[in-house]
Image: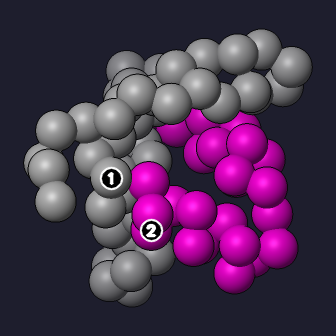
Amino acid sequence: MSGRPVKRSLTLHGHRTSVSLEEAFWRAFRDIAATRGQPINALAAEIDDARDPDVGLASSIRLFVFHELTGR
């Protein structure tokens, strides 16, 4: 498994954006969205809406995944 980020496109509120995450984070993010019964774009939009404007979307997604997996 490579530790290099993989860039993928997401659609947030009708606008396309690209996010670079390591494959392990993409897998966990997709799994969390599926468990919640949400499309990944909808979950990404929720994270985007709630994040601090000084923190990038990729970092916010990583932190979200970390908190979901660890309960911290």
Q: Which residue is mark 2?
A: 28
User: Could you tell me if the residues under marks 2 and 1 are in contact, i.e. CB atoms within 8 Å?
Assistant: no
Q: Which marked residue is nearer to the observer: mark 2 or mark 1?
A: 1
Q: Which residue is mark 1?
A: 23
Residue 54 visible (yes or no): yes
**Is 44 situated left or right of 11 in this image?**
left
Q: Residue at x 32, y 83 (%)?
A: 70
Q: Residue at x 67, y 66 (%)?
A: 33
Q: Is residue 20 above or below residue 67?
A: above
> Of all residues shown, which one is farthest toward the right?
14
Residue 44 spot, x, y in % from top left: 64, 43
Pick the residue in front: 61 or 9: 9
Q: Quadrant of the C terminus?
A: bottom left
Whether residue 64 is visible here, answered yes or no, is no
Dot 1 amino acid type = Glu
Q: Residue 18: give x, y in percent of width and height.
A: 52, 20
Magenta span contains residue 48: yes
Say which quarter of the image contains residue 21. top left
- Give me the C-alpha separation between circle 2 and circle 1: 9 Å
- Of the residues shown, which amino acid type is indicated by label 2? Ala
- Mark sitting earlier along the chain (2/1): 1
Magenta extent: 26-52
Apparent side of residue 37 relative to residue 10 in the rendered image (left or right):
right
Residue 27 locus on image (x, y percent):
45, 63
SS state under label 1: helix
Report the side of 34 relative to 28 (left or right). right
Q: In the image, is residue 52 above or below residue 32? A: above
For the stretch drawn in magenta, the main secondary structure is: helix
Q: Is residue 42 left or right of residue 65?
A: right
